[in-house]
Amino acid sequence: MPRKRSNGEGSIFPYRNGYAAYVWVTLPGGGRTRKWAYGQTREEVHDKWLALHAAAKRGPVATKSPALADYLACWLSEVIKPNREANTYSQYELSSRRYIIPGLGKKHIDRLTVREVQAWLNKLTGICQCCAQGKDANRHAAKQRCCAIGACCADYPGKRTIKNARDTLRAALTQACREDLIPRNVATMVVLPAARKMPERRQSWDVEEARRFLESAYIDHDPLYPLWVLILVLGLRKGEAQGLIWPVIDLDDAQVSLEWQLQRVGRQLIHKHHLKSDGSTDVLPLPDICIAALGIQWNAQQRMRARLEERGGTWPSDEIVFTTRTGRAIEPRAINRRFDARCAQAGVRRIRVHDTRRTCASLLAALGVHPRVAMQILRHSKIAITMEIYTMVPDKSTREALKRLGDALDWASVELPDDDD
């Protein structure tokens, strides 16, 4: 005589055109209910029934799992936004909206498999993001130049973008595991695919182009000349240069601490204290040309402050080095626009502001900066690495032209950018 089932073991029985089974489980929020499984054959349902029993013994089991798109929205708003920095939230939200939801958003989180996630990542490497996001289609018809007119620009995601998308999914599913919504995190088991290899493009200046750019800004009394100097000579990132405040600049000891960054995150312009993982900051020596440039900036800013206060205005007290004429931080996009305009005026190739960092080492050699100072600026661990760069200095005329830029000027006509620049 067959053994009678114990309480909680559930049952398997014919159902419609197949079979059904249930097991009593404990919910993540407390209480007990039935968890159902369905299949075409009794053997198929029996395997699912055994898996449900095993899951019920391990701990709480969710009977309803949300679609991935719905869960990501909840995770971002309730877990990430209140507890992480705005920049972290922005990166997770961007990866979710652009890459994860279009590919996997309709899948329920408890039904995601390693194979599905791996297939999504593999496919992502071959999706032109200009086509997928309608970048070219959103331009004015007269300015459309690629995907919208049938000439795909092959704007494939890079290696970092693919990794960020995988990491975002992994972080979200880790939280789902903590909430007992899923038994395992399938995103931890996938292999990152290799990004498509794009043709290498030269995206940096040589010393002669850097000289022409700085000399053009110097001669034209470009109000952002001091910022261009720090970016090119010290290799600063745009956010590091824009986030500089006067208290971290020590002109007596000729050094600067990179403690602050300025970033636009969504609709917010955030000026935040930036520390490395060990709590330290980078302290860089200031070559003569940087000291002269900061002197120009100080004098120009004091004149703008005096004019604002004469008109009854109030200068902000945050002590940011590079500001508009009313003392507010300059928009990052405004920096990009003014950099592009200066490239055109100087007659040099248009590159990104970030790409100027690659010119820093050669420029230091051309300026005659002592190798030990250059070693600190470039963060080299061995002087031999720095000296390899110093064996490839440009000609004498270029060195002399750059050296002249280090002489201080009293630029009485310099005015800082407008607030809407």
Image (cartoon, rainbow, N blue to C red):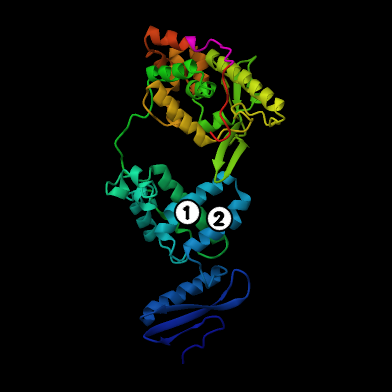
Residue farthest toward the bottom in the current orientation of the protein: 1
* Disc on the earlier residue, 1 or 2: 2
* Residue drawn at 48 percent across, 61 percent down: 69
Q: Is residue 416 above or below residue 181?
A: above
What amino acid is labelled 1 in the image? Ser
Residue 76 - label: 2
Q: Tell me residue 162's x, y (percent).
A: 41, 47
Viewer-closest of 119 and 139:
139
Viewer-closest of 293 and 171:
293
Q: How many marks?
A: 2
* Residue drawn at 60 percent across, 39 percent down: 270
Viewer-closest of 176 and 351:
351
| Residue stretch in magenta | 404-412
Q: Which residue is mark 1?
A: 96
What amino acid is labelled 2 in the image? Leu
Viewer-closest of 39 and 94:
94
Name the chief secondary structure element in magenta: loop
Q: Are marks 1 and 2 in contact (CB under 8 Å)?
A: yes
Alpha-carbon distance for marks 1 and 2? 9 Å
* Residue drawn at 41 percent across, 17 percent down: 212
Q: Secondary structure at mark 2?
A: helix
